[in-house]
Image (tube, coloured by chain):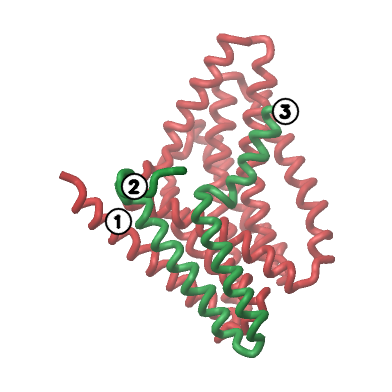
């Protein structure tokens, strides 16, 4: 059972390691999807949201990872 | 031209990613083999490979039944999460924020753990060792299977991409078994950096296609995305290096 739980946790870990990072990516995808649904004739904007959003999420997340722990928001 | 760009990128991504995963699995299998002999190590690895084959055989035909836009969206989002996770980690390792993955140290840790288990419960150790080998092959192999299916799904590229992944795994297995020690000199972080850039680009492309985005240049857009992800990653490493220098005394 312990092994199975370990395997399941490792499987989830393939996609989600830093929860905030994964959530930010999903929010970018959701924003792009909402735009695609609301403006089906302007899908290039939806593509731009996806591209710029993903690059920004990556850049901001790695910069945040470097910040000294004292400057990060304390956990609730 | 466009098809060959997509095929070339998919084959390269699968080959490089499989190299990394095979190196990690080999380290554990070698540790098990060193401590408890090749029987539990081999049997565990074979059981892992058999389960992986079963997953591929079961999952392959199922994917053909999923509508293409839904498949593109689901696979694209998973590839984005998976690829950007690899890229993020590779950036942080390159910038020195987190430690590099060290196969020699992973090998030492695994052998130490198994020796400790040997001391505590010797009669059951073959099971424990076999399960360690099985788990390593299964988990690292699942990453390979996911990458192969994700970059080739719905494009009729499953066979060439699978062959690239198999060649990489066989290559590492042969070299590792011949040397009889973990492959600590493989530039794992460089490979992860490269594969992270490629998988993130595929993920972005597929997610967009699933949402109905008509990317300019069709499949060639993947190459542009690779350039943009690479530029962002290099900029991140440079920025982190500068910040690190500014903070350190």
Which image quarter: residue A4? top right
**The N terminus of chain A lies in quadrant:** top right
Image location of residue B24, percent across then percent down: 53, 40
Q: CA distance from mark 1 to mark 3?
A: 41 Å
Q: Residue furthest left?
A: B249
Which hue is chain B drawn in? red
Question: In this image, B43 relative to A60: left or right?
Answer: right
Rendered image: mark on residue B97: 2
Q: CA distance from mark 2 to mark 1?
A: 8 Å
Name above or below for residue A67 compared with residue A5: below
Q: Are marks 2 and 1 in contact (CB under 8 Å)?
A: yes
Rendered image: mark on residue B99: none
On what subunit does the disc labeled 2 rest? B
Query: Observer-nearest residue: A62 or B42?
Result: A62
Question: In this image, B68 relative to A55: left or right?
Answer: right
Tag 1, which secondary structure?
A: helix
Residue marked by disc 3: A1
On what subunit does the disc labeled 3 rest? A
Q: Residue furthest front?
A: A76
Tag 2, which secondary structure?
A: loop
Image location of residue B37, percent across then percent down: 61, 21
Query: In this rendering, do the residues under marks 1 and 3 share a single chain?
Result: no
The residue under the point 44% across, 48% down is B188
Q: Earlier in the sequence, mark 2 or mark 1?
A: 2
The residue under the point 38% across, 49% down is A73
Query: Observer-nearest residue: B7 or A13?
Result: A13
Residue marked by disc 1: B240
């Amino acid at each position: 059972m312990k092994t199975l739980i370990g395997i399941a946790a490792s499987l989830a870990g393939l996609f989600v390691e830093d929860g905030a990072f994964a959530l930010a990516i999903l929010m970018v995808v959701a924003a792009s999807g909402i735009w695609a649904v609301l403006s089906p004739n302007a899908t290039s904007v939806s593509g731009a949201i996806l591209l710029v959003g993903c690059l920004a999420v990556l850049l901001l997340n790695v910069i945040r990872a470097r910040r000294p722990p004292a400057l990060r928001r304390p956990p609730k | 031209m466009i098809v060959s760009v997509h095929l070339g990128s998919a084959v390269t991504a699968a080959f490089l990613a499989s190299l990394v995963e095979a190196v990690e699995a080999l380290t554990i299998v070698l540790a098990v083999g060193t401590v408890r002999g090749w029987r539990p190590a081999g049997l565990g690895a074979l059981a892992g490979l058999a389960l992986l084959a079963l997953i591929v055989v079961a999952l392959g035909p199922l994917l053909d039944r999923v509508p293409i836009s839904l498949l593109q969206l689901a696979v694209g989002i998973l590839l984005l999460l998976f690829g950007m996770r690899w890229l993020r980690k590779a950036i942080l390792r390159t910038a020195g924020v987190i430690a590099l993955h060290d196969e020699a140290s992973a090998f030492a840790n695994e052998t130490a753990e198994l020796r400790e288990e040997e001391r505590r419960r010797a009669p059951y150790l073959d099971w424990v060792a076999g399960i360690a080998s099985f788990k390593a092959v299964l988990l690292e192999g699942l990453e390979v299977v996911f990458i192969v299916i994700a970059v080739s799904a719905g494009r009729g590229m499953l066979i060439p991409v699978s062959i690239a992944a198999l060649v990489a795994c066989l290559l590492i297995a042969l070299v590792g078994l011949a040397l009889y020690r973990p492959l600590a000199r493989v530039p794992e972080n460089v490979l992860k950096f490269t594969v992270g850039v490629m998988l993130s680009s595929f993920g972005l492309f597929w997610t967009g296609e699933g949402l109905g985005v008509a990317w300019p240049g069709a499949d060639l857009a993947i190459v542009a995305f690779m350039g943009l992800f690479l530029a962002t990653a290099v900029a991140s490493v440079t920025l982190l290096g500068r910040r690190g220098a500014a903070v350190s005394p």
